[in-house]
Every structure is written in structure tokens, then in C-alpha cells.
Image: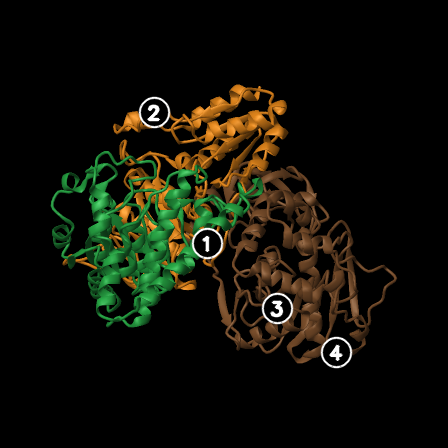
Chain colours: A green, B brown, C orange
Amino acid sequence: MQLNRDDLLKAYRQMKTIRVFEERVHDEFATGDIPGFVHLYAGEEASAVGICLHLNDNDYIASTHRGHGHCIAKGCDVKGMMSEIFGRADGLCGGKGGSMHIADLSRGMMGANGIVGGGPPLVCGAALSAKTLGTGGVAIAFVGDGASNQGTTFEAMNLAKVWDLPAIFVVEDNGYAEATSSSWSVSGDAVKRAAGFDIPAQRVDGHDFFAVNEVAREAIERARSGGGPSVLHVKLNRYFGHFEGDAMTYRAPDETAKLRQEKDCLTLFRGRVSEAGLLEDAQFDEIDRDVDALIDEAVSGARAAPVPGAQDLLTDVYVSY
Amino acid sequence: MSEGIDAITMPKWGLAMTEGMVAEWHMSSGDRYSRGDEIADIETAKITNALEATKPGLMRRIVVEPDEMVPVGALLAVAAEESVSDEAIDAFVTEFQSNFVPPGTEESSGPVFEHATLSDGRSVRYLRQGTTGGATIVLVHGFGGDLNSWMFNQPALAEQFDVVALDLPGHGGSSKDVGAGDVAAMSQAVAEFLEAIGVRAAHFVGHSLGGACALHLALTSPARVASATLVCPAGLGPDINMEFVAGYIDARRPRQLRPVLELLFHEPGLVSRDMIDDVLKFKRLDGVPEALATIAGAAFAGGRQSHVMTEKLGGLTVPAQAIWGLSDHIVPAPDEAAEFDGLTVHRLEETGHSVHMEAPSKVNALITEFITAASG
Amino acid sequence: MAKKSMRQAINEALASEMRRDPRVVIMGEDISGGMGAPGEDDAWGGPLGVTKGLMPEFGRGRVLDTPITESAFVGAAAGAAASGLRPVAELMFVDFMGVCFDQIFNQAAKFRYMFGGKAVTPLVIRTMFGAGLRAASQHSQCLYPIFTHIPGLKVVIPSSAYEAKGLLIQAIRDDDPVIFFEHKAMYDDEAEVPDEAYTIPFGEANITREGDNVTVVAFGRMVQLANQVADKLAKDGIECTVIDPRTTSPLDEDTILEEVEATGRLVIVDEASPRCNMATDISALVAQRAFGALKAPIRMVTPPHTPVPFAGDLEDLYIPKPEQIEAAIREIAA
């Protein structure tokens, strides 16, 4: 599939939205008004957007604790997300989930997940639904390099292969599981591990939207056409700590500054597209302005929104009880 | 076995019954009794009822003590005239016991339910027992009942007649689609059922809603109906106890259902826990709540019977009788003064809506005599 | 109505719901059996033959054998339930919850709440439990209190073949995750079971015996024991009410409280380990809400606080017995 101008505009808008959303959450968190744990996706945008650009509402994804980027790329409402992160009644989950549990099943977003390695088995189920019900959908599990070591991830890969499911496992390897380097914690690597399951796999530079988009296209087409599961090993970097408040003392002093300067997926994207003469600067600038305004609105909306009340405590546990 | 000696044995009430016990003897050795007298109360898992004498006799020996569980067919007591010696009775008992083989569980399932298919594909479960060549009787139960409601009647009538008991649509083991659910629709299903099993005409015995169906068919399809016995029938007045109908539909637990089922009897003690459980089990089947609600809405709309045929009785062309329990709490027995064209009404004391269960011997006798006369 | 074993009753429930709803699929280790092997198809139908015959009728697409990977397939069942199927997963022994519990209690149980009421997770996990088959410590436990503890799960423990069919059909039609406990020593137990589909609602206790002297609450196979004891004691003039709650979540608190208020005496028979089990839970309930009605201390009949032993004589000592139930009732019936 050749990307057309609309695709490029959409990709840039989504990546930019994720970036501004996360930078803003970082700032808002510092005010003390956002409760709980927040894990930011800034720096990794090309992965979520490069992959999800191929998906529609029939397709499912399961995300991680670092889930805001996947949510936005899969079409979750940005204002609803911001309200959820602030713990408001009008949040996407009514303030009952928070940053780590944002979900919108109507969009095929099965949830960020507080459990490292929680998602891959669920994705086998979504892929089974697609296969059994003949929806033509695929299901994608995003995991980090940390979850790539979890038994659930291996079990799910094995099951996906044994059941011949339209499932894709994306290992977003940002180099750190919490404060531990993947160079130490991961023995072997994701592509070699996939070979052990006889699952086709590719490694890709996660700063390069076009590279991610291309390997994802192959994997998703294979899944849609009954070719079974795939593994993608996406090498990328996060700009912030494991969670907000992480002083990142385990990283080199100038590491993130350098990454922002040399490996920013947004800058790379804009440069490539401008060079090829596909989009004008003015178009990028317009999107930048739109996104800034959207996130401003999302934050002011969330701050003004009511918090859930006592009447909400006991609801939504069961459909009926 | 021996001349002049009668074995009184554990009766078989309903297909499921394999054993029972004497709850209480109503007579002792030396008592003389008439036909219809209560010999003992028999308790089964499903129901406690009186064992009635089928002919007169002299009680000579009680064999089974109260509270002893014995299989169907086991010897309970021995009757004989004075002329028979005690030694002969001893010998009779010994011989009976040595020859007695309790029915195995497979054997006891004996007659099996059959299913007929109506033209619209609905299935009707039925049980056919009795004498081939005898006149055919069709037994039609009431709202919420099933063919087992005739457990005290069908085996007795089957000694002389060809007896078919069916489950109305929505009931027992029949399809739960009741269509419009009114008397006409239920009657139509009964007529189609008889066609499906190749019965052109039959003597109808209908209880309650089933009585209304029997009467409706007698009025609208007299060729199918050789005679009609209406047991506490619906269709002869507007009154219906909605406490029963609504309570039957709504009750989900034994404690809620017990008082509702007690309305069916003169003697509420007849309602056993197993009877309650059976009804609850029936009501849990897929489609049953909807079926019962449809019937209740169609046949008893606004708390009154929708299909009253009293005015049309003059047009009856087949012999018809009604048997009513005077303590009927569901469809109250008509006053002594009430006259129904072409319909003989028998009123039985100390019996309720399920008069055919509370006084089976009397009801069976009335049916037998009536059908014998009608068959002429 | 024919007599059927609990094995057959469960098989009928699965078959009837699979016929009724194409979204119902079943999965588990060897629920059909023989995948990839040179011998017979449908070789096992589950380790105890409960699902035998379903694969030939419904095909491999709806009767899914799995590798021995409980996390993957229990999680897959949860994910499938959240995305349009109505899966019934078989966790062969509940003792194996240890290798898949995250998928049950952190994922399936919490979807609805965490996602603000927008998720529907019609998942059933059938699982074997209970002692009596000399299966030792890792194949004999009664872990239903652990599941009962988790908001978002429903927990069902049938006490007979009849109850099993109606409760399982209810479970499959239910829109919440349900853990369905099958006592492994009860598969051959027979009861009259209708051929047709029927449902027994959750949260409605069954009062199996009615009596004025002592209330006995029992679960699963213990209901049978309690009924036997109640029948025996009735001959001595001690009349017991026996309550089978059917589901521990939701729990029919009202029925338990009403009956305790009527008798003033309570014995709870629970095959689960004695700490934080259903017996302690119900004791706390009654102590809080019917304390004034109690005429005697509450008695619990449970196994000791040990793993389930292997040796036959030890296991027999371990499992609650009718004599213990009788003694407990007599002790407070006075």
C-alpha cells in the first residue's frame, strides 16, 4: 500500500497528538493534580501510529501500562482520555480505570494494562473471536521488552501459532524495563525467539514511521489472509522515565536530550515528507496548532469536569448481580 | 393365586413411582370395608394419597408396618372372607413373598412417553395406556399441569379403555410454543394431535382449562367428541382465582409456591415437597414462563375467564357431564341451583379443584359409567 | 425425565447452549483430545469424559483443544468474551489457578469496572475441585473461597446433576465471568434431569430440607452429606433445614438469615480449608445480622488446616464426614 497524502496527514496528526498529550500530562502531573501512576509514551509514537494506521474498528489491540499512545492511535477520544487520567466522571472509563486501564472496546482498544504481560493472552482471544465470527479482524498485542520475558507472552505466541490465529505480537523495546536495561534482562532477542515458535518476525527501527508502517503492513496482511501470527521487534526510546517521578538515574546524563535531537520520530517524519515534497510546511504547522488547541481543551475540560460521586462506587462491577 | 384371597399391594401412581410406604393404616385386621373405602394412606416421594378399596372385602392380615419403604407391587395386606383359614393366609403370604420380584428401575419405566408432531412442527408428548379395542379416552390437563396429573386415573381407566393423556402445548414435555394461548388455540392443538396419532373421535376428559378445551371441541367439532367429562372445568363462568394463576407464574421458591399449590386441594397436606419441586423444575424450562404468561393473558385476561360457553350449552349434541369438587378454590363449583343445559353436574364433597387426584375412585367410577353408557 | 449422571448433565448443558448460540465455544486441555496424534479423534472428551462427543457435533472450530498453557487459553477465553464470543474454558483442576489467576482476577473480573461499565465479559470457567479421589495436595483443593473473594466474578457450586445442568446453562447465558465448580467425585452421581434446557437463577439458595431445630448450610458435595444426616436425625426428632446456596457469589444472604432466625441454630459444612472459607464468611454474616436470634454457638464442619493428604486413610480423615456433621448438629440441637 502506497501512503497517500491523507494517510500522511493522519499519521502526523496522530503522532503529534500523542507527543503533545504526553508532554502535557508530564507538566500537569507535576502540578500534583493527576492521581496515581502515569507512564508516558513520548518518543515511541512511530510504533503505535505506524502499526495502527492499518487497522479499523473491527481490529483489536491490547496495550501496556504505557498505553496512551496506543489508545490515541486506535482512535480513542482524546478528551475522554485526559479526563480519565484526571480521574473525572466524564473520563473514558468514568474515572474508574485511570491511566493504566484506559479502554474503548467499541474502538477495538482492549485496554492499557497494569499487569506486565497481561495483554498477549487476551489478544489470542480477540483473534479467536475474529476467526470464529469471520469478522476479518486481526488482534495485536503490544508488549515492552519487560513483558517480552513473561511466560504469558510465550504461551500466547505458542497458542496463536497452534490455533493459527490472526494475531501479531509487537515488542516495543525501549531499552528499559523499569530501571533495568534490556541488554541485561533479555537473553537472546525477540526475532530469534519467534523463530523458535516458527512465527515470522522482523526487527525494525521504531523511530522510522515508514519502516514500522511497512513491516506492520506485511504482518497484518498475512494475518488477515489466514497466514497466522507474526512478531515485530520495534527498537525505540522513551523520553521520560518509567513512571512520572522517575529521576532516571539509571540512564546516561545526556541520553534523552541526545535522543530528542537525533532520533525524534516526528522530526524524521516531517523531514522525509517535506523532502519528498508530499506535504507543505504550512500543513504541518496547521496540524501543530490544531493539536495544541485540542490538548488545551482536553486539559481545561478535564480540570473542569466533575469527579465521580459515591453513587458510582458500587456500579459497573457486574452486568447483573 | 389362591381362591377367595385378595392381595392388597403397593400401587403405582405415575410412571416415576418405584416405591412407597404406608403412612397410616385406616383399618386393622378383622375390619370389613366397602368399595371406595380408604384402606391406608400411601406416601410416595411425589404425593401422599389414600389407597382406596377397589372392591368390598374383609381385612385379614396387615403385612407391612407404617413407615416401611417397599417397592411398587409389594404385598401390603391380605383380605379374605372368614371361611379362609389363617393357615391358608399364612401360606398365601409366604408364597407371595417368595415369588415377588420388585420391579427393576428399567422395567419400571415400562410404558414410555411418545411424541406426535403437529402440522406446524410443534411436538406433543403423550402417554397411551390401556386396552386396544376399548373406547378411546383422551385426558386433557389444566393450566400448569401435565399428563402426570392423571396418575391416579389413567392406569385405572386403562383397565377397560384405550387411554391417551397428552401434554398441552407449553406444558410437560410438549413444545413450549402456545400460539395465541387461548382456549380455541389449545383446543385446535388437541384436535390436531388426535389427527396426528390417528384418533378420529374420543371420549374427552378435561380438567380445568383442559375441560374448557373439551367443551369447546364438543361444541365446535362434535364429530371428534364421543362424550365430554368436564372436571372442575373452565369455560362455564367468568370466575377464576387469579391468586392461583399469578402465584403459579410468579413463584420462584418452594415457600412461595406451596400456598399456591395448596389452593388446588381440599386437603392442603396433599402438597408434597416433591410436587412443589416438580412444578419449579417445569417452570425453569426454556419457554415455559413465556408460555404460561401467554395462556394466562389470553385465557384469563383481566382476572376473568375470556372464553365462557354457558350460553352455548343448548347447542351441545354429545353427552356431557361435569364433576366438581365442592372445595374448588380455583374455579368455584356452581350453586346447586345452577342448571346447565345438557350437562349433568356431580358435586363431590371434601374435594378441591384437583378432585380427580383427591377422590380418584369416585371420579374414575363416574367416568367409567358415563363412557360406558355413552358408548351404548 | 430420565436419570442422568452429572457428567451427562454438564455435557447436555454445553451441547444445548452450543446449538442455541453459535457464539458459544469451549476450550481446554484435551476437552476433545487426540490432536495431532495418530489414534482416535475425540480420544478423551476431557480427562473424565465430560465433553465427549461435542467435537464430532460442533467441530474443531468450536471445541478447541489447547496446549497445556492455562495462562494463554484462560486469558484467550477472557479476551474472546470481551470481543464477541461466549467461551466456556475448562481449567482441568482448580488447583491450576496458580498458573493463570492473573487472567481471571486481574483481567476478566475487572474489565467491566475498570472500563467504566462498558465491557461485557460472558466467560465461563468450568473447573474440577474437591477431595476424595486420592489425587493429593495439588489436585484436590476447594478453592472457591478465593474466587468468591474477587469482585466481578460469580461463583457457582452445583450439588447434583439436576442443579449442574440448570446452573451451567444459566452461567453460559450470563453476561459476567462465572467460575463453575464441579466436584470430581460427583460426575457419576445421578438425578432426574430434563432433556430440555432450563435455567436456575444465581443467588437463590435451595432449601433442600425444612425443619425447625437447626439450620445447616452446605456447599457442593457436602449438601448430599447434610441431607443424609438431616434425614437420619429427623427419625430422632431433630428437624434440620438444609440450605444449598448454589452460588457463593452472589450469596443468598436473606435466605440464610431468615432460616437462622427461624431455628436459632446454625451448622455450616464447607469442604474448603477452614481459614477464610465460606463457613467463616457465613458465620460473620450471621454474627453481624442475626446475632440476637442465635440460641447456641455457630458450628463449622470443615477439613483441618492442612493440605489434602494422599494416603487413603489420611484423606478419609481429612474430608468432612456425616458423623462430624451429625455430632455438630446434636451438640447445638439440645
Residue farthest toward the right in the current orientation of the protein? B337
**3D distance between C-alphas at marks 4 and 1:** 80 Å
Q: Nearer the viewer, mark 2 or mark 3?
A: 2
**3D distance between C-alphas at marks 2 and 3:** 60 Å
Q: Residues within 10 Å of mark 3 (few under 14, many from 20)?
A: many
In the rendered image, residues at marks 3 and 1 fall on the same chain: no
Name the residue carrying label 3: B137
What's the amino acid at mark 2? Answer: Leu
At 67% from the left edge and 79% from the top edge, which residue is drawn? B221
Q: Quadrant of residue A137?
A: bottom left
**3D distance between C-alphas at marks 4 and 2:** 75 Å
**3D distance between C-alphas at marks 4 and 3:** 18 Å
Q: Residues within 10 Å of mark 2 (few under 14, many from 20)?
A: few
- Tell me how many marks there are: 4
What's the amino acid at mark 4? Answer: Thr
Task: Determine the secondary structure under disc 4.
Answer: loop
Q: Residues within 10 Å of mark 1 (few under 14, many from 20)?
A: many
Q: Nearer the viewer, mark 4 or mark 2?
A: 2
**3D distance between C-alphas at marks 3 and 1:** 75 Å
The disc at residue C317 is 2
In the rendered image, residues at marks 4 and 3 fall on the same chain: yes
Name the residue carrying label 1: A79
